[in-house]
Image: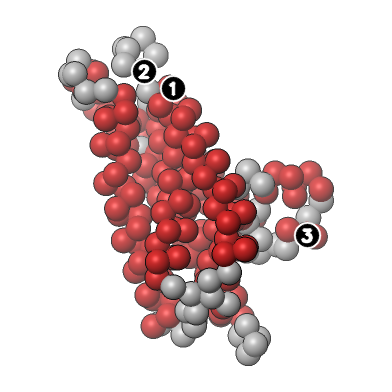
Amino acid sequence: NEASISTWYLVPGILVIVVGAASTMMSAIVIAREWERGTMEALLSTEITRAELLLCKLIPYYCMGMFSMGLCALAAVTLFGVPYRGSVGALLFISSVFMLCALGQGLLISVSLHSQLQAAEAGLFSGFLPALLLSGFVFDINSMPPVLQAITHLVPARYFNTCLRTLFLTGDVWELFWPCLGAMSLLALLMLGLVYKKLVKRLDV
């Protein structure tokens, strides 16, 4: 940001918050809605496997989230004048990994809570507040207390914020991207693994 324009610094962080919070909140109600409407019993009585059920709930919201990310990135460049110096392929790849984290978090909430209202509130707070306060968007992580700095390692938005700002303002710096991608991949695998474990095809859960 050689021009020291605050918009160039703030807009990529806003994209992280908007896309992450929206994806988490959308996916947080997807399974809870099935329980609330009484259609989950019909799904559980079919021959569909847990993996197939998880993919059916994951893929549509992944596509919606990636489409939203594309629109937001386009708006950042055309409406706010933020330069984009990275490659489109890098943006798609990094955004995909982050999207799996956000959707995994939302689905974990959705399989844990059977109320749409509770799931939506949990998705909003868990997707929005950590991304706002602990991603480095508002407060510099290095200036936080050590306890909070340790907690930020569990927030996927921290890594996506770093990658997105680098893509917009610097370009493809894979030496920086790979550690962030590794951390986001581990978080995504953990959350999706918990979702798969909790998505038991029984009615007594």
Q: Please identify the quarter of the rendering in which residue 165 is found.
A: bottom right
Query: In the picture, which quadrant includes the N terminus?
Result: bottom right
Q: Name the residue under label 3.
A: 142
Neighbor class of circle 2 (other Cα within 10 Å; few <14, some 14-19, many 20+) is: some
Three-letter code, disc 2: Val
Q: For residue 97, say whether it is visible.
A: yes
The kind of secondary structure element at disc 3 is helix
Judged from this view, the residue extending furthest toward the bottom is 3
Cα–Cα gap, marks 1 and 3: 36 Å
- Measured in 3D between alpha carbons, the distance from the residue under mark 1 to the one under mark 2, in whole angstroms, is 7 Å
Q: Indicate which disc, 3 or 2, sits on the residue closer to the N terminus.
A: 3
151 up-or-down from 174: above or below: above
Up-down relation of residue 132 to residue 169 (above or below): above
Whether residues under marks 1 and 2 lie with C-beta atoms below 8 angstroms apart, the answer is: yes
Query: Residue 26 or 149: which is nearer the viewer?
Result: 149
Q: Where's the C terminus, which quadrant?
A: top left
Q: Where is residue 79 in the image (x, y as percent from the top left)?
A: 40, 82
Q: Which residue lies furthest to the front in this view?
A: 175
Mark 3–mark 2 distance (CA, rounded to whole Å):
41 Å
